[in-house]
Amino acid sequence: MATPIGIPAVRMSRRQGRIRVGALSDTHVGDMLPRLPEEVLELLDGADLILHAGDLTEPATLQPLRAIAPVVAVQGNHDQKAGVELPRTAVVTIGNLRIGLIHGHRQRALEAPAAVLSLATRRVQLLGLLRWLRRRLGDVDVVVFGHLHMALARELDGVLFFSPGAVYQPEVDPTIAWDGLAGRAARRFRDAIPHEDLMPSVGMLEISAAGVHPRVLRLRGPIRPPVPDAGRWHRGAS
């Protein structure tokens, strides 16, 4: 079970009873991107708290975020491979509101059928993902997660599930080549996701007495500096 983290609501009165919680995931600095895009910091500026839902792959990614607000981060599957030590889950308490934070990757036995069905139907099939997230986090009001590299806001059984999307999106990476069987399968799966949900993005949760309002904030600029064609990375490569 996730360990609760209490966040003092010291800034609530400054915005007429509103708190802004920034959310981001799948920044992939170090393995896919050379650094965090400056636009991420611009979009999250003014947040009272920032939640990172995993796949940093480089712990230094959190430093510029901490210059904006306190940061809570959890470990993603790429973080595990990179040896980045973070908790797998966290629950942040703001007043009476409990926000669960998790990356969202499941065992291959659970993820593989969802991927196959998504390919067959050309629609994203979550196959119980949201209820699985809730079971992992316990009694929460909001779940912030990543891993899918797609933005999503959905309510189920009174719980708001929010994926802010991903900062790193292969569709806008000029170094990606979708080669081989695995690359073509990945591309077909991604083709089932609405185009706007595949744009690089972060999120903001606006919390007030009226409830929690999630917003997806799209990055408009490039996610990496221009690179020569010789640096192309092959998506189908192991």
Image: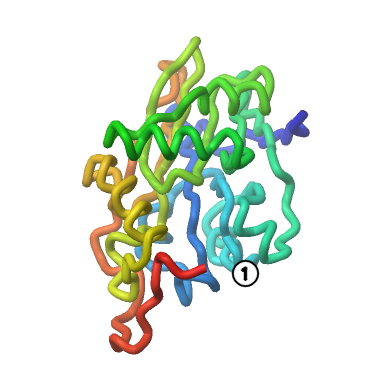
Residue at 61%, 68% in the rendered image: 58
Question: Is residue 95 depicted above or below 5 in this figure?
Answer: above
Q: Position of residue 34 (x, y in %)?
A: 47, 77
Q: From this viewpoint, which residue is outermost toward the top?
A: 157
Residue at 57%, 60% in the rendered image: 56
Which amino acid, by three-letter code, is at mark 1?
A: Ala
Q: Position of residue 179 (x, y in %)?
A: 34, 68
Question: Is residue 152 depicted above or below 73 in this figure?
Answer: above
Q: Position of residue 190 (x, y in %)?
A: 31, 48
28 on left or right of 37: right
Q: Which residue is mark 1?
A: 60
Residue at 67%, 27% in the rendered image: 137
Camera-side residue of 43 and 86: 86
Residue at 28%, 73% in the rendered image: 174
Badge 1: few (under 14), some or many (20 or more) residues near its Cα, within 10 Å? few
Colouring used for the render: rainbow
130 on left or right of 15: right
* Quarter of image, res 63: bottom right
Camera-side residue of 93 and 165: 165
Camera-side residue of 201 and 128: 128
* Quarter of image, res 213: top left
* Quarter of image, res 11: top right
Label 1 sits on a secondary structure element that is: helix
Q: Position of residue 125 (x, y in %)?
A: 39, 30
160 on left or right of 93: left
Quarter of the figure that contains the N terminus: top right
